[in-house]
Image (cartoon, helix red, strand yellow):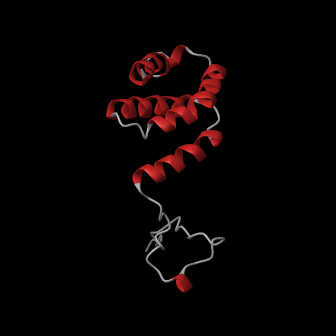
Amino acid sequence: VRLRSLQKLERVLVKQIESLPTDTVDLVAEALLKPLLKRMKDKSEKCREISVRILRSLVENVTDLSAILAYVFGVLVQRLGSEDLDGVAHLPEAMRPDKEQKPTEITRPVEESEEV
């Protein structure tokens, strides 16, 4: 039942999504986001694959990603076993940075040099 339902959704939301209005895609993404994310934990690999394809199509075609990404990243972190995204779990408690602190990202790692 789940597989057939996902296959029907895939026909519309992956193969024919270009013909759908953006408002419809936004409403469908809002309504189906959580059920599709639950299918990523399904016992059947085929159901997981189809749900990922549908999610990918929705993410590519939705107008506002901000509402979707918070849920998608949470499931991906859990699914991929990436709880320690900051890389500080191995450090003693006293050496870990405060939760308010975020790691700094070097935006230009290679320093530009002057022309000679």
Residue 6, compared with residue 102, is above or below; it is above
Identify which residue, 107 or 105, lies in the foreground. Answer: 105
Give coordinates of residue 96: x percent, y percent: 55, 79
Residue 2, compared with residue 65, is above or below; it is above
The quarter of the displayed image where residue 2 is located: top left
The quarter of the displayed image where residue 115 is located: bottom left
Residue 110, compared with residue 56, is above or below; it is below
Q: Please, which residue is most extreme toward the bottom here?
A: 94
Give coordinates of residue 72: x percent, y percent: 53, 43
Looking at the image, which residue is at 51% across and 19% down? 17
Identify which residue, 21 or 87, lies in the foreground. Answer: 87
Q: Please, which residue is most extreme toward the left here?
A: 45
Name the quadrant of the N terminus. Answer: top left
101 horizontally vs 14: left or right: right
Residue 102, compared with residue 17, is above or below; it is below
The quarter of the displayed image where residue 50 is located: top left
Name the quadrant of the C terminus. Answer: bottom left
Looking at the image, which residue is at 47% across and 48% down? 76
Looking at the image, which residue is at 45% across and 19% down? 5
Give coordinates of residue 51: x percent, y percent: 44, 31
Looking at the image, which residue is at 47% across and 70% down? 112
84 horizontally vs 49: left or right: right
Identify which residue, 100 or 60, lies in the foreground. Answer: 100
Give coordinates of residue 108: x percent, y percent: 50, 66
Identify which residue, 64 or 30, lies in the foreground. Answer: 30
